[in-house]
Amino acid sequence: MHHPFVAVLVCALVAAPLAATAAGTELTTRLDAQLERNRARYGIAGQAVLIRHNGKLVYQAAHGEKDVERHAPVSADTVFDAYSLAKLLTSTLVLQLIEQGHLELDAPVSRYLPNLPVAWQPVSVRHFLNHSSGVPEYFEVHQGAVVSKGKAGFPPTLDAVFASLSDTPMRFATGSSNRYTQTNFLVLTALLQAHYRQPYAAIVRQRILKPLRLRDTWLGPSGVPAARLATAYIGKDGALRREDDFAWPAYAQGHAGLHTTVGDLDRFLQALAAGKLVRRATLQHLLQPHPLSTGRNSGFVSGWEVGQSGDYRQVGHDGGTRVRARLLFKDTLAGDTWSFVYFTNGSARNVWSRTLVDSAMAQVAPRLFPRETLSERMYTHALANEGSDDTALKTWLRDGSGIPAKELERELNNAGHAIRENLGDRPALRVFTLNTQLHPQSANAWDSLAECHAALGDADTAAALYAKSRQLAEAAKAKP
C-alpha cells in the first residue's frame, strides 16, 4: 500500500504522553514539540520514547500510529521490531563469560571454536565484538554459496554458514579498521552455544529475559500478539510503504529480529548500568576506547558504538534507521548517567535514529550536550524560510554553542552531511554556506559546499568552489 508523504504530514497526530514525574511541565512540552517536529520533518509513522536521568524517569511518550492503514495508535505497550539491538543481548552475554573467566578477550577465537575458517582462527574475541575482525558478510553471495539475503535463503546451520565462507577473502587486515558485519555476531553466538551447550534463545531467556522480567520481549516476531505489534514501514519516493518482517533463521537471533517495547529495553539498560548483568567496574573497563592498529580509536567497543557527548562518555546501538538505545555516563556508571530509548516503526525519509536521539538530547539538556544541540539547530536552520536572518544564529554559534572554536567548522560540516542524508541536498546547502561564512579560510568548508552544489547539478558553481578549496589547501600547506 502506497501512502503519500503529504498524508503522513497532515494526518491527525495520535499523542499519548505518559508519566513524566521527574520532568517539569516545560521540559515535557519541549519534548512533545520535538517529537511533533520529527514527525513532520521526516514523515514518521509512529514513535515511542523513554528518557531517564540517574535512573529517574524524565519523559515517556508515544506518538503517531503503529498501523497507518487502520490508524491504530502507538502506546506504551506497542511492540517494535528492534532489529540489531539484538546485538546488545549477545554482547552482554559474552561480557559475562569474560568477567567469569570463561573467555579471554584477546584470545584467538580458535581456542573456543576450532572449526571456523582457517583465516579467522587467529582473530581474537575482542575483534569480533568490536567489528574489527575483517571477516566477510555472510548474507552476501560468496563463491556461489547460497547466502544472499532475500534470495534463495540461508544455509541451514551455523557450521554451514562458516563453511560457505571458508574460501572468501578477509575484507581487511584484522584490527586495522571497523566494518559493521553480522558475521561477527554469528561467531559470538557460536561461542555462547559452545560454552552453554544450549541454543542461543534458551541462553537469553535464562540469563537476561527471566532475571529482568522482560515479559514483552521476543526473539523474532513469533509469539508477539498481533494487536500489539507495530507495522514496519520504509520510505520510498517520499512515501511510507509497508515492509514485512524479514525471515531470519534461528541462528541469526544473536544479531537481528529482536522484538520489544521501550519499557523492556529501558529495563535492560537500567539493569546494565546498575551492574546487575555485568559488574559496573568490569563493564566500565570493557567500554574503554580501544585503538585500531592505525592508532585511530575503534568505533565499536565490546559490542557498543562509542563516542563522547560533552563531558559524557556515550555508548549505544541502533536498529538501522528506526530504533536506538543510548547510555551516557559522566565519570562512572555509578555517577551521573542518562539513558535514551527512541523507537519508531519507520519514516518516509528513512531518517537515521541517531538524529532522532540527538534531537531529544538537545531538548533535555542543551548545555550538557552541545554537539547534539548544534545538530538540532542546524536542522531548524536548514528548513527555515529562504532569506531569514541568521545573525542571531551566527552569534550563538561563535559565543554560546559550547563548541570549542577549533572544532566548530568540523561540527558544522558533520551536521551538513547528516542533513544531506536525511533531508536532501537543498536544505544542506544552507548549512554548508553558513559554514563558509563563519570559516572563510577553511578548504574543507568550501569543498563540502562545492560537493553539495555538484549534487544539485550546478556544475559551474561547483567547479569554482572546488578551485577555491584547492587554493586554500595549497596556501595552508605553504605556510611555515
Image: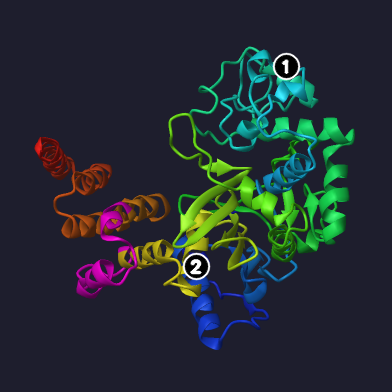
Dot 1 or dot 2: first in sequence order is 1
Q: In this rendering, does residue 43 appear at all?
A: no
Relative side of 414 to 188, left or right: left
Above or below, 336 against 450 in this view is: below
Give the x, y percent position of residue 176: 49, 28
Give neighbour class at mark 2: few <14, some 14-19, many 20+ (Cα, 10 Å).
Answer: many
Query: Secondary structure beneath disc 1?
Result: helix
Magenta region includes residue 409: yes
The residue sitting at 77% across, 63% down in the picture is: 228
Q: Label 2 sits on what residue type?
A: Met
The residue sitting at 46% across, 64% down in the picture is: 6
Q: What whole-number distance in Å separates the C-alpha atoms at marks 1 and 2?
A: 45 Å
Number of labels in the image equals 2
Viewer-nearest of discs 1 and 2: 2
The residue sitting at 56% across, 32% down in the picture is: 132
Q: Label 1 sits on what residue type?
A: Ala
Give the x, y percent position of residue 258: 73, 49
| Circle on res. 14 | none
Give the x, y percent position of residue 270: 71, 63
Give neighbour class at mark 1: few <14, some 14-19, many 20+ (Cα, 10 Å).
Answer: some
Give the x, y percent position of residue 235: 52, 51
Instruction: Name the residue carrying label 1.
Output: 163
In which quarter of the view is residue 454 placed? Answer: top left
Q: Where are the magenta residues, as a range? A: 382-410
Depth check, front residue: 73 or 141: 141
Relative side of 285 to 348, left or right: right
Query: Secondary structure beneath disc 2?
Result: helix
Instruction: Name the residue carrying label 2.
Output: 361
Residue furthest to the bottom: 25
